[in-house]
Amino acid sequence: MPYELDDRLVIGVASSAVFDLNDSDAVFRSQGEEEYRKFQEKNLNNPLPKGIAYPFIKRLLSLNDLSASPQDPIVEVVLLSRNDPDTGLRVMKTIEHYELGMTRAIFMQGKSPYEYIPALNISLFLSGNKSDVDGAIKAGHPAGQVLKSKFDDDESDKALRIAFDFDGVLASDESESVMQASGLSEFHAHELKNVMQPHNPGPLKEFLVRMAKIQSIEESHKILNSEYENRIRVSIVTARNAPSHERALNTLKSWGVMANDAFFLGGIDKGRILGVLKPHIFFDDQPSHLKSASTVVPSVHIPFGITNRD
């Protein structure tokens, strides 16, 4: 009987998102593929350093302890790699070293593997490779580029904090298009007029919905285990403010999800808030917001919508 993915949260990751590949990439760029291959073979048993998305992936996989059976995990993380199987072996050994619980991988020498996202029911693909992420988004897949960011892997912190921008990330760029074309006043007027009309989904809507399902599993687990403390905390950190906040909240409700926190900042620098909130990952579509965010938290660019068009 095949291993089914439909009822799981499936994440696809490139090794560039989870591990620090600076040394390996430097060899490839300066000395070519053959020396890169020798470098990886020589360092086969030297684990790669942890990368920016590592704390997020580790905590995400730890949620599998909520499953009744190790053979039936609620989270599956699949490695999607541009390496060939031989040079990718060091990555697999690194995964084993850190006991990450990732056993499935796709290796495609020199090619981007994002076309397999739908086949694997992936609701989020993370990579440090900009062209791979751009290609995935253009193909209509949920993807984000992990940026060079500050990150902290506090082993004693078992919580998983995820923060999202709203427009262009969870929702489509319909309202952002009004903002860009006509300004703030028309944007607020548009949102008031359509306050009861849910937004069309953006790239990460399905990822949020699947995270909400795991939060429901946590609540059920808590009923049977009174000492259990919820680990997942979802926050919305958006440049919206009143009166445009209500449509965003109505949209989340229509999707059957609810954020634990919502920050309607109305132009306040997001980095100021994120530095206190300390999410393990933050998703935004606008590079201007990510410039400050990446100085304080692991940040991911979602190159979707009007603000990312050339």
Image (cartoon, rainbow, N blue to C red):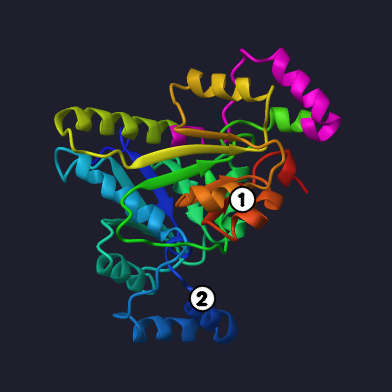
Whether residue 121 is visible: no
Q: Who's the residue at 36% across and 52% down the image?
A: 78
* Mark 2 burial class by Cα count in 10 Å: few <14, some 14-19, many 20+: few
Q: Examine the residues drawn in magenta and state their main secondary structure.
A: helix
**Residue on which disc 2 sits:** 22
The residue type indicated by label 2 comes to Asn
Percent coordinates x, y for residue 52 in the rendering: 47, 62
Asked if the stretch drawn in magenta spans residue 196, the answer is yes
Secondary structure beneath label 2: helix
Whether residue 216 is visible: yes
Percent coordinates x, y for residue 43 in the rendering: 35, 83
Mark number displayed over residue 272:
1
Percent coordinates x, y for residue 116 in the rendering: 45, 47
* Mark in front: 1 vs 2: 1
Q: Who's the residue at 60% across and 54% down the image?
A: 293
Q: Nearer the viewer, residue 146 or 196?
A: 196
Q: Give the residues in magenta.
A: 179-208
Q: Residue furthest right?
A: 182
Q: CA distance from mark 1 to mark 2?
A: 29 Å
Q: Is residue 127 left or right of residue 268?
A: left
* Position above or below: 275 against 67: below
Asked if the stretch drawn in magenta spans residue 206, the answer is yes
